[in-house]
């Protein structure tokens, strides 16, 4: 009888842990998505409103050059 009661308590605890873990993981994922979107918005504001057009062209050429030479070394 004691073993059955122990297993019953363990099963209930496991079910509670799994449901709380699901809620906890959903909170983490939603927080990460929010931070990603916020970072993209801030980068977009920086790129389109703070950088001058010549700075944007320079950054684009720099990325293109890095890609070109990265592929050449590999």
Image: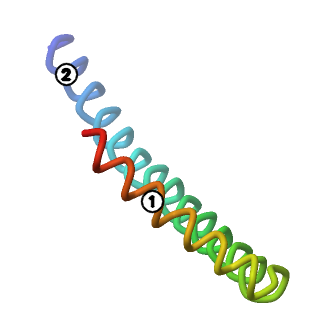
Residue occupied by mark 2: 7
Disc assigned to residue 26? 1
Q: Nearer the viewer, residue 28 or 4?
A: 28
Disc assigned to residue 72? none
| Residue 32 percent coordinates (x, y) | 55, 59
Q: Residue furthest top?
A: 2
Q: Please give the count of numbered marks on the rendered protein.
A: 2
Answer with left or right where residue 33 lies relative to residue 11. right
Q: Nearer the viewer, residue 51 or 31?
A: 51
Q: CA distance from mark 2 to mark 1?
A: 29 Å
**Where 36 falls versus 8 (above or below)?**
below
Q: Nearer the viewer, residue 46 or 63?
A: 63
* Dot 1 alpha-carbon crowd within 10 angstroms: few under 14, some 14 to 19, many 20 or more: few
**Where 14 falls versus 58 (above or below)?**
above
Quadrant of the image containing the N terminus: top left
Quadrant of the image containing the C terminus: top left
| Residue 37 percent coordinates (x, y) | 59, 74
- Element at label 1: helix
- Element at label 2: helix
Q: Who's the residue at 37% across and 42% down the image?
A: 16
| Residue 42 percent coordinates (x, y) | 74, 75
Q: Earlier in the sequence, mark 2 or mark 1?
A: 2
Q: Who's the residue at 37% across and 58% down the image?
A: 68
Task: Mark 2 vs mark 1: give the one in front.
Answer: 1
| Residue 6 percent coordinates (x, y) | 25, 17
Q: Who's the residue at 63% across and 64% down the image?
A: 35
* Dot 2 alpha-carbon crowd within 10 angstroms: few under 14, some 14 to 19, many 20 or more: few
Q: Who's the residue at 23% across and 21% down the image?
A: 5
């Amino acid at each position: 009888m004691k073993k059955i009661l122990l297993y019953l308590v363990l099963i209930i605890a496991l079910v509670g842990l799994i449901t709380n873990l699901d809620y906890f993981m959903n909170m983490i994922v939603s927080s990460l998505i929010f931070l990603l979107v916020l970072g993209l918005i801030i980068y977009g504001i920086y790129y389109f409103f703070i950088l001058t057009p010549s700075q944007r062209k320079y950054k684009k050429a720099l990325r293109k050059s890095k890609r070109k030479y990265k592929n050449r070394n590999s």
